[in-house]
Amino acid sequence: MTAFLSLLNFLPTLRSIWPLQSIWLLPVFGLLQLLCLLVFALLVSMLEKNQRQINTGRISPAQGQ
């Protein structure tokens, strides 16, 4: 019974901490999403660069057909 009462006493403090956490989590997830987007864009640009080198390099259009 005492454990239940201490849990009830702990809940309001948890509720007062949560808004701070949600305010803090939103920018963190935003930055994480931005970072993933940046990495993806970098990967795509690297792949395009490689494709351009292949197209202008060893493989001629005649061989490709």
Image (cartoon, rainbow, N blue to C red):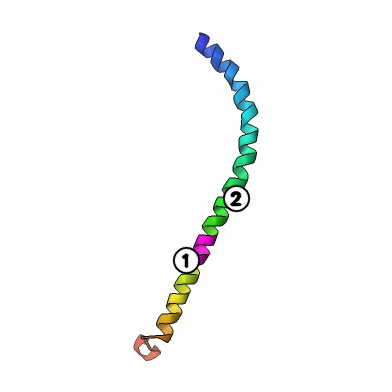
Image location of residue 24, percent across then percent down: 62, 40
Q: Please, is residue 13 above or below residue 22 in the view?
A: above
Image location of residue 63, percent across then percent down: 34, 88
Q: CA distance from mark 2 to mark 1?
A: 20 Å
Q: Nearer the viewer, residue 27 or 65?
A: 27
The answer to which image quadrant residue 9 occupies is top right
Q: What residue would you read off at disc 1? A: 43
Outermost left residue: 63
Q: Nearer the viewer, residue 42 or 65?
A: 42
At numbered mark 2, what does the secondary structure look like: helix, strand or loop? helix
In the image, the segment drawn in magenta is 38-43
The residue that appears at 62% across and 27% down in the rendered structure is 15
- Image side of residue 44 versus residue 34, left or right: left
Which three-letter amino acid code belongs to the residue tagged 1?
Leu
Q: Earlier in the sequence, mark 2 or mark 1?
A: 2
The residue that appears at 47% across and 76% down in the rendered structure is 49
The quadrant of the image that shows the C terminus is bottom left
- Image side of residue 53 versus residue 24, left or right: left
At numbered mark 1, what does the secondary structure look like: helix, strand or loop? helix
Image location of residue 46, percent across then percent down: 46, 71
Q: What residue would you read off at disc 2? A: 30
- Residue 47 painted magenta: no
Badge 2 vs badge 1, beta-carbon distance below 8 Å: no
Which three-letter amino acid code belongs to the residue tagged 2?
Gly
Q: Please, is residue 51 above or below residue 44 in the view?
A: below
Outermost top residue: 1
The residue that appears at 43% across and 86% down in the rendered structure is 56
Q: What numbered label is drawn on residue 29?
A: none
Image location of residue 30, percent across then percent down: 60, 50
